[in-house]
Image (tube, rainbow, N blue to C red):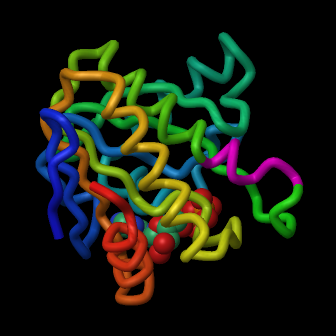
């Protein structure tokens, strides 16, 4: 599924983000930038140790990456040149600022992409795995945050959501169909 928002193409696909041929892929990281399970583990396995080496430097400089913010490293051996690491909120029932923090992940990642002249960027579904964010809610928040950002900023050619499983893809597809794009 694909729509156009200003100059940018917004695409939903099902697949493995580590295989994406884009300028940058986004990682659903943790605040310590220590790697872990889910998409984070897959990205470090596929990209090799150069990514963690840069995460270690960032941790030494600034102590990690607070929830809702983003940092950038090399893509190591990945097809993508860069990895943008952002930390989604852990779902605590919805009244602990989760929507704002999740929207912030997408905004901060796209700001960092623009700053680094990245033209094509792929996102996973942040927070909906180990962090337990319900997919339907996360999808609406994610797509709205991206749409709002793209309405205010030119320069990115494509934003692609790379969704791992059927249920996640279906959740994003529903949310995008319900949006005014
Ligand atoms: P979080 O801790 O932010 O919840 P997870 O990695 O546990 O992050 O899950 C986020 C989403 O990433 C889930 O929908 C999960 O199915 C998906 N995912 C896992 N591996 C991959 C992959 N290789 N490519 C794309 N998405 C993936």
Query: On the picture, is 154 further left or further right than 99?
Result: left
Residue at 53% across / 52% down in the picture?
28
Q: Nearer the viewer, residue 130 or 179?
A: 179
Q: Examine the rendering and report whether any part of residue 168 can be seen.
A: yes
Magenta-colored span: 96-102
Q: Position of residue 89 (x, y in %)?
A: 72, 52
Quarter of the figure with residue 61: top right
The single residue placed furthest to the bottom in the displayed view is 166
Q: Position of residue 118 (x, y in %)?
A: 22, 25
Main SS of the magenta part reads: helix
Query: On the picture, is 144 further left or further right than 89?
Result: left
Residue at 35% across / 24% down in the picture?
152
Residue at 57% across / 64% down in the picture?
138
Query: On the picture, is 28 further left or further right than 45?
Result: right
- Quarter of the picture containing the C terminus is bottom left
Q: Position of residue 78 (x, y in %)?
A: 22, 46
Residue at 48% across / 41% down in the picture?
106
Q: Examine the rendering and report whether any part of residue 37 can be seen.
A: no
Quarter of the figure with residue 33: top right
Q: Position of residue 79 (x, y in %)?
A: 15, 46
Residue 98 belongs to magenta span: yes
């Amino acid at each position: 599924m694909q729509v156009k928002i200003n100059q940018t193409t917004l695409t939903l696909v099902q697949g493995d983000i580590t295989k994406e041929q884009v300028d940058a892929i986004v990682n659903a990281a943790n605040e310590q930038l220590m790697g872990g399970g889910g998409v984070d583990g897959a990205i470090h396995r596929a990209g090799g140790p150069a990514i963690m080496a840069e995460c270690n430097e960032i941790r030494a400089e600034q102590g990690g990456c607070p929830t809702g913010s983003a940092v950038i490293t090399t893509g190591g051996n990945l097809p993508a040149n860069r990895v943008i690491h952002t930390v989604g909120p852990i779902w605590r029932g919805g009244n602990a600022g989760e929507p704002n923090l999740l929207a912030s992940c997408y905004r901060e990642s796209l700001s960092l992409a623009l700053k680094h002249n990245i033209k094509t960027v792929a996102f996973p579904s942040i927070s909906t795995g180990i962090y337990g964010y319900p997919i339907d809610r996360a999808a609406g928040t994610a797509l709205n945050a991206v749409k709002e950002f793209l309405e205010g900023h030119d320069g990115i050619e494509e934003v692609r959501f790379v969704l791992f499983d059927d249920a996640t893809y279906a959740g994003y597809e529903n949310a995008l169909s319900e949006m005014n794009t």
